Image (cartoon, rainbow, N blue to C red):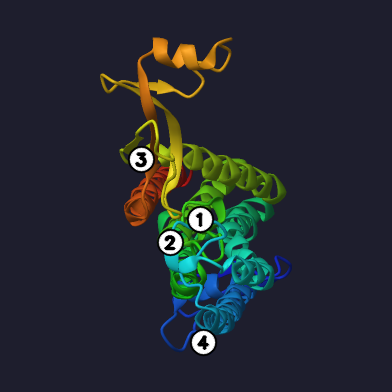
Amino acid sequence: MTTTAHLGANGSGPAASDPDEAGEPGGRGPLRGLAWLVWRQHRLFFGLLLAAVVGGAVWCAVLRSRAGEFIASHHIEGCSMISLVPRCDGTQEAVTEFRGTYGQPLQLAEMGLMLLPVLIGVFLAAPLIAREMEAGTHKLVLSQSVGPLRWLAAKTAVPALVVLAATTVLSAVFAWMWAVVGDEVSGAYWYSTLDFAALGPVPVAYSLLALAVGVLAGLLLRRTVLTMGVTLSAMVALQGGLKLLRPYLMPVVSTEFGPKESAQLPDNAWGVGQGYHTRSGAHLPDTVCQSAGNYEGCLRSHDVVGQYMDSHPASHHWPLAWIESGIVLALTAVLTVIAFRVMRRRYG
C-alpha cells in the first residue's frame, strides 16, 4: 500500500504514514491505522476534553459535598425562598445564604455543560474536515487504497466516541451533584434553560449533533474559519429553536382553582400558561378582560368561576429530556447520512 501524507496535529507540517502501519510505534494498542492518525491529529482537543472531564468531576464532587453539608446542617432540603411546605417556615434566611454561597458555582457548572456542544462543534467538528479540504490533503487520500468513505468514517467515528464518552461522564457527574443541590433550595429548577441543557441525555445528544453539523459544513464549505462560524450559528439556532419547542413535546397538566383559591403551583412545576376557566369548563386567556373598563363585570359576563394554570410537573422532566434528545439524535443521523452522500457524490 502506498503512503498517505497527513497534516500534523497543528495543521502545519506533514505526518506521513501508511494507514495500515500508522501504529509503528504509536499504533501499538487498541488504535491502529486511520483511527490512530485521527487521534494523533486531534490529540490536543481530546486532551483538553479529558481535562474538562476530570476538572468537572472534581468541581461537582466538591460542590456536592460542601452544599450537601450546608443543606443538612440548616435543614433546608426541598425548601425555597417562598415555600408552601410547612416545615420550611423560617428557613428563608438560610436558603438565601445557600444561594449566595453556592448559586454561582452551580451556574458555572451548568453553563459549562450547556456551552460544551457549541465548543465541540466550533473547535473540533468544524476543522475536522474543513482543514483537510482547505489544505488539499484530502486529495492525497483519494489517490490511495483508502477510500473516501472509509476516510470520512474514521475522521468522524473516533471523535464521536471520544465526545460520547466525555459528555456522558460529565452529564452523569453533574446529575449526581444536582440531585443534592438542585431544584427548590438553589432555585435551579429542572426546567430552566441552564439546568435542562445540562441534565441527562440532553448535553450528550447536542454534542453529537454539533459534531455532525461541523462535519457536514466542512464538506460543503471547505474553509475552516467559515465552517466554524456557520457551525456556531447553526448550533445556537438549533438549541434556541428546540428550546421554544420544548413545552409542546408533551401534553401539559391543567390545574383549575376556585374563586377563593390561590392559583399557585408546586415549586418544582414548570408553569407554561394560565388564564380563567368558566362554569362550562372552557379556558380563557388571562388577557381576556385586560382592557375592560369594568374588570369584574367583564369576568362575570364571560361566566368566569376561577383560574387555571397549565404546567409540566417534575415527573415530566425525564420524558421531555429523552424526547428532545431523540429529536436531536434523529437530526444527527440525518446530517451524518447527508455528509456521507456528499462525500460519495463528490469523490466516488
Residue drawn at point x = 59 percent, y = 65 percent: 92
Q: Earlier in the sequence, mark 4 or mark 3?
A: 4
According to the picture, the residue beneath numbered tag 3 turns out to be 249
Q: CA distance from mark 1 to mark 2?
A: 28 Å
Q: CA distance from mark 4 to mark 2?
A: 65 Å
The circle on residue 197 is 1
Q: Residues within 10 Å of mark 2 (few under 14, many from 20)?
A: few
* SS category of the residue bearing label 1: helix
Q: Is residue 269 left or right of residue 107?
A: left
**Residue 262 in the image: above or below residue 134:** above
Residue drawn at point x = 69 percent, y = 68 percent: 100
Residue drawn at point x = 44 percent, y = 16 percent: 299
Q: Earlier in the sequence, mark 1 or mark 2?
A: 2
Q: Residues within 10 Å of mark 4 (few under 14, many from 20)?
A: few
Q: CA distance from mark 1 to mark 3?
A: 15 Å
According to the picture, the residue beneath numbered tag 4 turns out to be 24
Q: CA distance from mark 1 to mark 4?
A: 42 Å
- Is residue 109 visible from the viewing direction of this image? yes
Q: Amino acid at mark 1?
A: Ala
Q: Position of residue 31 (x, y in %)?
A: 44, 80
CB contact under 8 Å: marks 4 and 3: no
Q: Which of labels 1 and 4 is toward the front?
A: 1
Q: Amino acid at mark 3?
A: Leu
Q: Amino acid at mark 2?
A: Val
Q: Is residue 260 left or right of residue 239?
A: left
Q: Residues within 10 Å of mark 3 (few under 14, many from 20)?
A: few
**Residue 311 in the image: above or below residue 150:** above
